[in-house]
Image: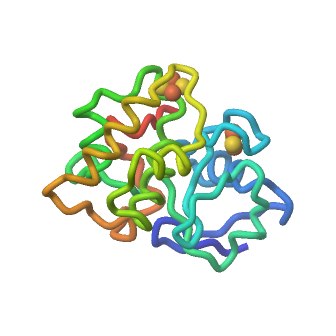
Amino acid sequence: MQLRINGQHTHADADPATPFLWVLRDQLNLTGTKFGCGIAACGACTVHVDGQAVRSCVTPVSAVQGKDIRTIESLGSAEHPHALQQAWIAEQVPQCGYCQSGMLMAAAALLSRTPHPTDADIDAAMSNICRCGTYQRVRAAIHRAANSPMPSPSISATKSASSGAAPQANGSAA
Ligand code: FES
Ligand code: FES
């Protein structure tokens, strides 16, 4: 089936019921998106589908056909990091890093619909689980990004889906 990921059209040969996370990681080598729980509980697998944060471990690949899909690989680059990635580095958010791709994608979806979120907005939107307990730093980094004088690069101004470069703050170790 045909998919549009990070602005690139690509083909996936998968059963329609296959979790989209497996297509991303195993077929398309987009390993920045992580597997944590497989039951939509942790948020490590968060991607954007038509601008909404979606947990790809429980989303069949058939459900994202024809949609605009964005993964952590499109959030920014080492040369041009997203304001959230800059803030993540400034606040030294990542610890082990495993949850951070999903955290960043959830935060990006939040800022796209609520550019200046309150603590309550952040707490409501960020249901991702971090076993290292980075929640306070995540909150601080989201506020920092929201107040950044530098405009965030649009997540739609993306690199290709096949580009492997990833900024330090995206937690994208395979
Ligand atoms: S791996 Fe998808 S929510 Fe945990
Ligand atoms: S930084 Fe380790 S799980 Fe979140």
Q: Residue at x 53, y 33 (%)?
A: 99
Q: Is residue 164 left or right of residue 53?
A: left
Q: Is residue 75 above or below residue 137?
A: below
Residue 93: x and y in percent read: 36, 29
Q: Quadrant of residue 142?
A: top left
Residue 123: x and y in percent read: 51, 43
Q: Quadrant of residue 40?
A: top right
Colour convention: rainbow
Q: Residue at x 39, y 51 (%)?
A: 118
Q: Residue at x 73, y 48 (%)?
A: 57
Quarter of the image with the N terminus in it: bottom right
Q: Is residue 106 above or below residue 63?
A: above
Q: Is residue 105 left or right of residue 75?
A: right
Q: As rendered, which of 57 and 25 lies closer to the eye?
A: 57
Q: Quadrant of residue 12?
A: bottom right
Q: Residue at x 72, y 40 (%)?
A: 41
Q: Is residue 131 above or below residue 121?
A: above
Residue 23: x and y in percent read: 69, 54
Q: Residue furthest left?
A: 149
Q: How many marks?
A: 0
Q: Quadrant of ligand 1?
A: top right
Q: As rendered, which of 138 and 26 lies closer to the eye?
A: 138
